[in-house]
Amino acid sequence: MTIAVPEDHAMVSIFRHHRDDRAAESPTLPLPPPHQEPAAPRYATDGPARLPLIYVRGFAGGTSGIDKQVDDPFYGFNTGSTHIRVGGDGNPQYYQFESPLLRLFADDGYHPLTSGDPRAYLQSCAAGSVDPATVWVHRFYDASADTFGKRAADFDIEAAARDLYELVQLVREKTGSDKVDLIAHSMGGLICRSMLQKWSYDSLGDFRPTVPGKDLVDKLFTYGTPHGGIGFAVGDGLLDEFMEDLGPVGSDIFSPEKMYGYLVPGVEYGTEAPDGWRADRIPPEDFDTDRVFCVIGTDAGDYGLAQKVVGPQSDGLVAIGNACVDGAHRAYIHRSHSGRFGLVNSEEGYQNLRRFLFGRKRVAVALSGLEPGPPATDGRRSFRQGELQLSIRGLPVVTDQQLAAHYCPVALEPDPDGDCVPLTTVFLLDPLTMPADGTDGPVSLPSRYALHLRVSRLTEEHGVLSWRDHLARTADWDDVLIVDVGHENDDPEGELRIWAAWNSELPGAIADRDPVGAGPLDHDQDAVPVPLPPGAGRLLGAGAAVVLTPGVWS
């Protein structure tokens, strides 16, 4: 069986354990004796330094749901999948891949320390003695389970945030790392934000924070977190049915009115939010949103009855418009909130996670030079809508899909201030520092990705879409921009270089050209414009261009 190695050197891990001796070993290490140096990780790499990872799970519902999660040492993050949706028919294909936890162990040198009580183990270790390349699970639900022979406590999101702060401090002390990375699903992202925005500044009982959360956490990655709360498309009986299905008292923490109380310092829980306050905003003094990445699900149909209440413009539970922090990086993937086709146990989610955590290259992509469309007349107006799909060489899935069919197209209207319309940010692993598994070095030096762009002009008459001139599934302009990103003279410390070409202008197969262009684009500019082909220029403006802004990411 031939396994293709991605050109940016992430492993496609179908049946990897059958061909890689390292992955055949158990990923769970025995617990080192207290106060001794832990054994060297079995999956050590020569790549960039690793920060400790802390996973924070989502809402588990009532006592039975909590007990089920507590019985799992990884709180559900060890679930992989044997399904993937490919092809135009939408039917699932058999495609086996491990959970993101196992893949981090095999691909990036991480390992868990789960024998016994992880907090007790950390407390027993000397400062700086624990390997930083470790994964920890914030087990905040343990106190709310009734399987430990004691009365279960009611779940408290603020207490969970306080305990996360203490865990972060403990992991930092024992590993000697300046910071940690947080990875969260659903409500877990709100726990992380409560810690960063409130409980690293406030005090609760004997809890007295000493260091702001922004000085403890390097990056925050969330899957399907309701950063803007959970809203409902309908109410009355269906809403009541949904609340019963979601869980017991406590599920109202997803209400924007309640979020104000656990996201703002000095505010008591339950305090009504003032006019104009937005739950999806992180104050810049609390945390840099450039260090936040949000995976947004767009498939409501795979989630179940809840999507009947939330509506189709969601992942089945969280509305698309509420699943991202304002100003953060994001990727839209056609997955549901959880389950067989969920965000966390998805190839798309993992590939975005790995690149955001470990990628050394990033390219911000925007559209500039848009000209205004024709003015509205007699209640009739035309507007332009864009669609985008991001493909990275060697991966079997697209890592970002902003499609009208998935309720997340790009509005292509010029900004009054003349700014660019942001499209996406591409994070790339560096072949020079992260060679492929099973090889002595990189297979191909440039990291390659493709942006499939489509633009359609739509018409409204008195606020209603008009189908008079409509051609279903037919764009007015459709092309693919191929981009290669590499270093000058193949030096990891050298300046980044970009090659780019439109697929419509390339003779033959894309793979026949590496890099894609005859020479790199003008590297003296921080932002490199790539003019659109003439057909798109007539639709969007003669000066319209895709603007690529490369940079080193760490």
Image (cartoon, helix red, strand yellow):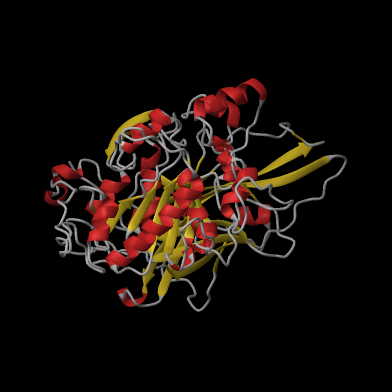
Of residues 144 and 183, the one drawn nearer to the viewer in this rendering: 144
Give whichever of 432, 235 is nearer the camera: 235
Q: Quadrant of residue 462?
A: top right
Q: Splitting the image into 4 quarters, where does residue 407 fall?
A: top right
Q: Residue at x 33, y 42 (%)?
A: 77
Residue at x 85% of width, y 39% of height: 379
Which of 279/350 is in front? 279
Q: Is residue 143 left or right of residue 402?
A: left
Frontmost residue, 377 versus 216: 216
Say if 59 sits above or below 130 in the image.
above
- Residue 457, compared with residue 152, is above or below; it is below
Residue 450 visible in the picture: no
Q: Quadrant of the N terminus?
A: top left
User: In the picture provided, is 335 more to the left or to the right than 455?
Assistant: left
Residue 526, horizontal then vertical, whole percent: 53, 74
In the displayed structure, 474 sits above or below 492; it is above
The image position of residue 315, as x and y in percent, is 51, 36
Q: How many marks?
A: 0
- Percent position (x, y) of residue 335? 45, 37
Residue at the image point whose x is 66% and y is 63% from the top: 369
Relative placement, left or right, of 292 versus 420 is left
Position of residue 339 measured from the top left corner of the image (x, y, whole percent) = 40, 32
Q: Residue furthest top?
A: 237
Quarter of the figure that contains the C terminus: bottom left
From where the camera sits, is residue 391 visible? yes
